[in-house]
Amino acid sequence: MRSYLKIFLFSALLFVCVCPAFLHAQPYPKVQNPANGHWYYLHLFLPVVPGGQDCLTWAEARDFAATVSYQGMQGHLATITSADEDTFVKNYLLTHLPLPTQEQERYVWIGGYQLNNQSGMNTGWRWTTGEAWTYTGWNPGEPNDCCTAGETNEENCLEHHYKLYNGNPILGWNDDVCGSCRYYFLIEFEPAPESVPTLNQYGMVVFILLIGLTYIFYLKRRQKTGA
């Protein structure tokens, strides 16, 4: 009887430890952008237990992405800073996202957000990584901070929105309510930036060079004196 109890407890422990990772590990492949060397991963969030949470708000997706790593690189919600990168990301998403319908559109959280109390719907946008906000890829009519007129902090988080527009599927940026719950989010992995020597490190290098030059000068003077 005790052996059966041990087997049961071990199985339960294994389920608790392995099941969440198994259910959250989705079949979408990670792909590398040859232009910048970064990797991208479309993640579909599924509930750990039947009836459990099956989607994430923008903040939850941001925090979840930060817990994921790949080949030693820390993950974060994707930041899209150029037209070329946006084209690469769109091609990746279009390969794997189900086609949208009138009843079912597709939303994918990415790493942009807008500061509160801005003067306009296009101002105050930031990337979670601190990268410069120099490129945008909005869908037609976006951002619109729907649905009160003007900028009212209603939609301050960024997503890729795959929908039908005039009967044709289009994929582009959309501002959305940060508390909206989404199944998909895009994780980006990139190498850590190379460390730049600090002033103290530079000072140490200069100090060592001066010591070396002084010693060489001393040896030459000594040779001349001895001659």
Image (cartoon, rainbow, N blue to C red):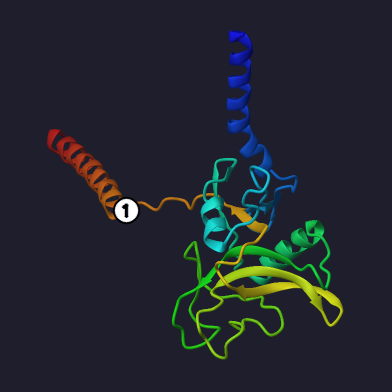
Element carrying mark 1: loop
The N terminus: image quadrant: top right
Q: In the displayed image of the protein, which residue is found farthest to the front?
A: 1
Which quadrant holds residue 108?
Answer: bottom right
Which of these two is toward me, 200 or 71?
Answer: 71
Residue type at mark 1 is Thr
Q: Residues within 10 Å of mark 1 (few under 14, many from 20)?
A: few
Which quadrant holds residue 220?
Answer: top left
Name the residue at 59% across, 32% down: 16
Name the residue at 66% across, 48% down: 51
Residue ID for mark 1: 198
- x and y percentages locating residue 26 in the rendered image: 71, 45
Which of these two is toward me, 92 or 142?
Answer: 142
Q: Is residue 62 left or right of residue 33?
A: left
Q: In the displayed image of the protein, which residue is found farthest to the bottom?
A: 149
Which of these two is toward me, 36 or 4?
Answer: 4
